[in-house]
Amino acid sequence: MALSDKSRNEAVLKAITANRLRDGEVIFLAPGPDLGWVERLDAAALFEDAAAADTALAAAKAQAEGEQFAVDVYAFDLRVTDGQRVPVKTRERIRALGPTVRIDLGKQAAA
């Protein structure tokens, strides 16, 4: 059964995040086979199915541990609403954008 535009818009996707050891910055796995990392959620790779996310997560963890550049590598849920990537949990929203009480701080200030 095909998803309607509204359902597709509200589908839960996965992204992979970590903290860079050098400066503690929140980073996200970038799209593509090179296992690159980006600092902005809007440039992160998104995964529609759990199997693809699990495979990418295992590779990202192995890379981060092997090269010792990031810690706490995990996947989290998000939705794309009106073209914006919106983490499902408040914790991930704060990690991706910055504090909820001061929108002039964090990555959201530069947006």
Image (cartoon, rainbow, N blue to C red):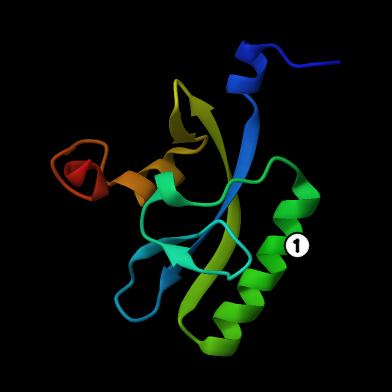
The residue to which callout 1 is attached is 55
Residue furthest to the left in view is 104
Residue 26 located left or right of residue 63: left
Q: Is residue 105 above or below residue 79?
A: below
Counting from the top left corner in percent of width and height, residue 106 is at: 22, 50
Residue 87 located left or right of residue 61: left
- Image quadrant containing the N terminus: top right
Q: How many marks?
A: 1
Counting from the top left corner in percent of width and height, residue 83 is at: 45, 26
* Residue at image location 67% in from the left, 63% down from the top: 57
* Residue at image location 46% in from the left, 35% down from the top: 85
Counting from the top left corner in percent of width and height, residue 36 is at: 50, 69
Q: Is residue 40 above or below residue 1?
A: below
* Residue at image location 65% in from the left, 27% down from the top: 11
- Image quadrant containing the C terminus: top left
* Residue at image location 58% in from the left, 71% down from the top: 34
Secondary structure beneath dot 1 equals helix
Identify residue type, mark 1: Thr
Counting from the top left corner in percent of width and height, residue 39 is at: 36, 59
The quadrant where residue 94 appears: top left
Neighbor class of circle 1 (other Cα within 10 Å; few <14, some 14-19, many 20+) is: few
The quadrant where residue 103 appears: top left
Q: Nearer the viewer, residue 65 or 8?
A: 8
